Image (spheres, helix red, strand yellow):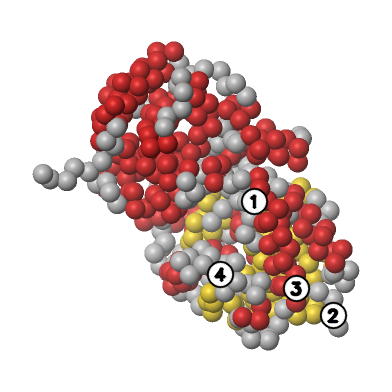
Amino acid sequence: MAYQPLPFRAVAANVLLAVENGQSLTQCLPPALNQLPPEQRPQLQAICYGTCRWFHRLEGELNQRLKKPLRKPDRVVHHLMLVALFQLRFSEQATYAVLNETVEACRALDKPHLTGLVNGVLRAAEREGAPEPKDDSSRYSHPVWMVEKLRHNWPDNWQAILDANNRQAPMTLRVNALRFTRDEYLELLAEAGIEANPTRFAPHGIQLERPVPVERLPWFEDGGASVQDEAAQLCTTLLDLQPGQRVLDACAAPGGKTCAILEACGELDEVIAIDESAERLPRVQENLDRLDLHATLTQADAADVDSWWDGAQFDRILLDVPCSATGVIRRHPDIKLLRRESDIVPLASIQLGLLEAMWSILKPGGRLVYATCSVFPQENHRIIQRFLKQQDQARLIEIDADWGQDMNTGRQLLPDPNSHDGFFYAVLEKPEL
């Protein structure tokens, strides 16, 4: 008997089950996409991202409709119903197609005994409409702990942060300043029929009115531009790069900031990019190759200085530390399912350890930029406060900028639904001997 590929809703249910079990969409979605014909892949991606984005609201509704939870071996059907609810509530898919094809997907998942349940739940959902959310977790579609932590940390902004997280992020480009001015690239986009505007804060940034495939971008394959959020681009404005400097990009993968550094100053002496992940470093090299740039790549734990450092100190260090990534949830909605409140304290310990290690290899008179894509103070200005208590010689450089909020030890950008992601930056200088 010929192999029958799974319907795309069944594939989506398996992806969501993998996310619930700890895999990111970045890990489990690519092999899932390969299971489907090319014309169905965009729909699978949209469904997986959308269901993760609205997971906690959809889960709240589904749990109200189920008399009792499904057994663990049948958990994939729970996710299949979430996929269907996402389509009913947030897509323009025809209702009859969602109902009928979800029942068929249940059979394809080898769960024929649950087709009656699936049919009954979805028909009731279609007939009765979406219920009023019972709590803030369902209303804002975030885990309870995240809602409460944001409410505590940002009493005046927490609702705006949650709302921004549920919006799809704009597509933002960084123009390669070694090839084009921003105005020149805006003209190229206009000639290609792509509507775009300059970003407010990043000097080489352009935000598109609507996302387009990168193949449509002028000179993209030849290194004319890269896709990078505006907040992430700001690192080069803070590093104060000068010709002849030795620069370290710690925790560099996937390489967007490494490339931005090289584009921002074409006469640097050397740029070294380190990342612990052997799987992610090739992506850094791919980005460098496309842009015709060169950096020395090293696989290592940046904090274990003795294992990789050659003894020559750095003029500039960009330390974009591992973090909760709560500032980029709109781009990675699976963070809502993957992150736990218990992650924050261990992450803060890693962040402070990395900062201490990088400080030891910064040249006197050198500058270190500390960055996260988090909105939690524990990972941001409180890390800098703790570090400054230990290193009383370290000089905090005030960031004179019209973006973000002044946190006394750095500036915090909160996610803007029409602009940048959430990011934190602090700038430290080492005193001259």
Which marked residue is nearer to the observer: mark 3 or mark 1? Answer: 1
Q: Quadrant of the N terminus?
A: top left
Instruction: Find numbered disc 1 in the image and state the secondary structure of the residue it sits on.
Output: helix
Mark 4–mark 1 CB contact (< 8 Å): no
Question: Closer to the camera, 355 or 14?
Answer: 14
On the image, numbered disc 1 is attached to which residue? 343
Expressed as whole percent of the image width and height from the top left, the position of residue 300 reads 57, 74
Between the C-alphas of marks 4 and 2, the distance is: 29 Å
Expressed as whole percent of the image width and height from the top left, the position of residue 335 reads 55, 46
Between the C-alphas of marks 2 and 3, the distance is: 13 Å
Q: Residue at x 17, y 46 (%)?
A: 3
Instruction: Find numbered disc 4 in the image and state the secondary structure of the residue it sits on.
Output: strand
Q: Residue at x 74, y 63 (%)?
A: 352
Q: Is residue 340 left or right of residue 64?
A: right
Instruction: Indicate which disc, 3 or 4, sits on the residue closer to the N terminus.
Output: 4
Which marked residue is nearer to the observer: mark 4 or mark 2? Answer: 4
Instruction: Indicate which disc, 4 or 1, sits on the residue closer to the N terminus.
Output: 4
Between the C-alphas of marks 3 and 1, the distance is: 24 Å
Expressed as whole percent of the image width and height from the top left, the position of residue 178 reads 53, 70
Near mark 1 (Cα within 10 A), the count class, few <14, some 14-19 or many ≥20, is few
Whether residue 334 is situated above or below residue 105 in the rendered picture: below
Instruction: Indicate which disc, 1 or 2, sits on the residue closer to the N terminus.
Output: 1
Residue 306 appears in the rendering? yes
Name the amino acid, label 2.
Answer: Glu
Whether residue 272 is situated above or below residue 193 in the rendered picture: below
Instruction: Find numbered disc 2 in the image and state the secondary structure of the residue it sits on.
Output: loop
On the image, numbered disc 4 is attached to which residue? 275
Name the amino acid, label 3.
Answer: Trp
Which label is found at residue 432?
2
Instruction: Find numbered disc 3 in the image and state the secondary structure of the residue it sits on.
Output: helix
